[in-house]
Amino acid sequence: MAIQTDVDMEALDGILSATPDIDSGDLIYILQEIQTAYGYLPRPILSEMSNRTSIPISRIYGVATFYEQFHLAPHGKHTVRCCRGTACHVRGAQSVSDAIARTLKIEPDQTTPDMLFTFETVACLGTCFLAPVMMVDDDYYGHLTADKIQDILERYT
Ligand code: FES
């Protein structure tokens, strides 16, 4: 049975028809294609995908929530990740996080209304020697202080 939704199914139709005989082994690829088409993974699209394939919805959500690359909510053009790990915390990560929130006027796990930035906090970015550190997309910024944040974020506007 088709899902009633406001989300346009046309892109899903194209993705599924381009990959016949889909099974769980194709799941990451298909989810990447859906995210490219919609900008994130809309829940009605995942339900419809499950209906049209033999892949259980639990398996789809299992993969969608396991990999950091997938987003279940609309995501900004740029992703700001502020580390809140111990090494960063003791070197002032909270004031950096507060400065990001002040500059973007959003809290962690939110996206700016213009869809330019999504702000996330993470447990460790793996570059503790740069503490406190944040990433904007694939760019690392280390030894941060709150007064550097606005200049850095303006580079992405
Ligand atoms: S604790 Fe911040 S990068 Fe590791």
Image (cartoon, rainbow, N blue to C red):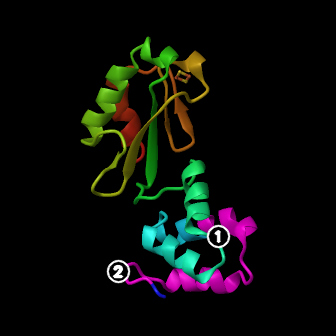
In the orientation shown, which residue stands out farthest toward the top? 90
Position above or below: 131 against 26? above
State the mark number for residue 5. Answer: none
| Count of numbered badges drawn on the protein | 2
Rendered-image quarter of ligand 1: top right
User: Which residue matches tag 1?
Assistant: 30
| Residue 147, x across and y down, in percent | 32, 23
- What is the span of residues highlighted in magenta in the rendered image? 3-32
Q: Residue at x 56, y 76 (%)?
A: 49
Q: In this view, does 94 lie to the left or right of 127?
A: left
Local secondary structure at mark 1:
helix
Q: Which amino acid does label 2 sit on?
A: Asp
Does the stretch in magenta take in 60? Answer: no
Q: Which residue is drawn at 51% across and 78% down?
A: 48
User: Which residue matches tag 2?
Assistant: 6
Q: What residue type is labelled 1?
A: Ile
Q: Residue at x 29, y 41 (%)?
A: 104
Instruction: Place residue 152 in its image quadrant.
Output: top left
**147 or 17, nearer to the observer:** 17
